[in-house]
Image (tube, grey):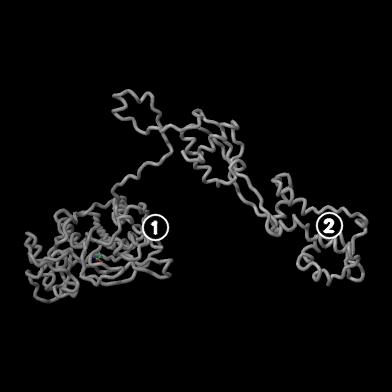
Amino acid sequence: MSDFQLDVLKKLGELGEIKSTLKTFSDKDSQEVLSALNSLKAHSKLNYTKHDTILYELSAEGTDILNNGSHEMKLLKLVQEVGNLKISDVNAKLGKDGKLGQARAFKNGWIKKNENNELEVNDKIKGENEVKDTTQIELQTVVDGKADTLDKNTVNDLKKRKLITPKKLTDFEVVKGEQFSLEIKKLETDITSDMIVSGNYKDLEFKPYNFNSQGLEVQSGALHPLSKVREEFRQIFFSMGFTEMPTNQYVETGFWNFDALYVPQQHPARDLQDTFYIKDPKTADLPEDKTYLENIKAVHEGGKFDTIGYRYPWKQEESQKLVLRTHTTAISAAMLHKLAKDPKPTRLFSIDRVFRNEAVDATHLAEFHQVEGVLADYNITLGDLIKFMEEFFAKMGVTGLKFKPTYNPYTEPSMEIFSWHEGLGKWVEIGNSGMFRPEMLEPMGLPRGLRVLGWGLSLERPTMIKYKVQNIRELLGHKVSLDFIESNPAARLDEDLYD
Ligand code: PHE
């Protein structure tokens, strides 16, 4: 027990109660008093109630007025002394105080101006030498601790004139507790097996439970922001009747990544600078479907399906090369090839990682995630694609899209999708889309009437915007901080996504 705690108990024993700790322990600040009271209360030595009171302190000017009278009184006395006082003399004699006093002395009706522009004592108080100095009296009341007997306007006025300054004081009223005594026994916090065996727990005193104390923070796993946004996208797809594609393989043959998508074998996207090729093993087998392989060769070379093709000798070895997939459209192609066995309207989506041999900077990594949707139906058109994109992005809270023609080897027509970015004040690209080409679909054996539209976007971009991440490396890779992951709230794509 501290000396101060003992002092408090002694005083309480002496007086029976302490009405005001502020007055009783004027040398202690309220924080010190509070912590002493709290620990004594925990031992049921006392109880207390807290009162906040406002005390006023006099400023230097207020103290001067209290001791020597107000400015207006000083001026009145001077005028009484000299009879008529020239206004120009007021400053000379009283300095600043004279100037300050004038307004109030006039207002109180103590002085007036005569025809020579001099100050003289007002008729009604002539002869009366005991004029009350109200300001001084009010300040005296404040000093006596009776500010509460003054009316509110008066106190406010004194504050405005900077004669007094308020100070909030916390006062405590203390009464004895159930276990009041002058000493504190050590309270046990845990009951031990020894206490039970010896039975001495009956004589010991235990600390009461503190139901208000906060428990230890529970360490738990947390979802990565990308996972949260991914889950939001999945829900959007599911709500629109899509099923998820199996994208659990990062390595693909050039066949599915490029050839099946009608990307010619000399296309720049297939260059080493753009695509990661696998060293070991270098190649893999192609699909069993021999007709499909022949069809791919024919469509690239220009010998089938009413197309002039690219007119070059297509090489199977090139398409057997293994790559880290550069887009999830490789999976979409394989899924559409499967669909050809039993063609029907279908909606498929995937969200997974892709790899590109790119220079890494604040907004680009050599790997990222793609969100991709594929929709197959009879006789759908570009208009359906536009309408569908508007619906899809509206689910994420993105409206007012613009479409711009672009080129993909596997879609025609192709459109980049733009949305207006309020923050940047410009249109930003949010996705790529198109109607898959017959050169891609017909070799698979899909009927001509079954048309397929597709689109893709990155998962990182909306996540960075959502979580206000400036550098993609804070989101993906070894620099990601665990704190960042644990402390981030769940994603809500329908709020401020692209703004
Ligand atoms: N594969 C495209 C990309 O990587 C996205 C896309 C998918 C475009 C399907 C059209 C159709 O950007």
Instruction: State which quarter of the image contains the C terminus.
Output: bottom left
Q: Quadrant of ligand 1?
A: bottom left
Q: Of residues 156 and 269, which is closer to you in this image?
A: 156
Mark 2: amino acid: Asn
Q: Of residues 458 and 123, which is closer to you in this image?
A: 123
Question: For the residue labelled by badge 1, is the local secondary structure a helix, a strand or a loop?
Answer: loop
Mark 1: amino acid: Gly
Horizontal relation, residue 429 to residue 170: left or right? left
Q: Position of residue 256 (x, y in %)?
A: 14, 64
Q: Position of residue 252 (x, y in %)?
A: 14, 62
Q: Residue 477 falls in which quadrant of the image? A: bottom left
Q: Nearer the viewer, mark 1 or mark 2?
A: 2
For the point 26% across and 70% down, which residue is it?
Answer: 360
Structural crowding at the residue carrying mark 2, measured as other residues with C-alpha within 10 Å and reported as few (<14), some (14–19) or many (≥20): few
Question: For the residue labelled by badge 2, is the local secondary structure a helix, a strand or a loop?
Answer: loop
Q: Position of residue 158 (x, y in %)?
A: 72, 55
For the point 31% across and 56% down, which residue is it?
Answer: 225
* Label whose residue precedes the other's in the sequence (1 or 2): 2
Vertical arrangement, residue 188 with respect to residue 308, above or below: above
Horizontal relation, residue 399 to residue 198: left or right? right
For the point 34% across and 24% down, which residue is it?
Answer: 200
- The reply to whether residue 270 is in sight is yes
Q: Which mark is residue 108?
A: 2
Q: Which mark is residue 233?
A: none
Q: Of residues 283 and 440, which is closer to you in this image?
A: 283
Q: Which mark is residue 397?
A: 1
Structural crowding at the residue carrying mark 1, measured as other residues with C-alpha within 10 Å and reported as few (<14), some (14–19) or many (≥20): some
- The reply to whether residue 453 is in sight is no
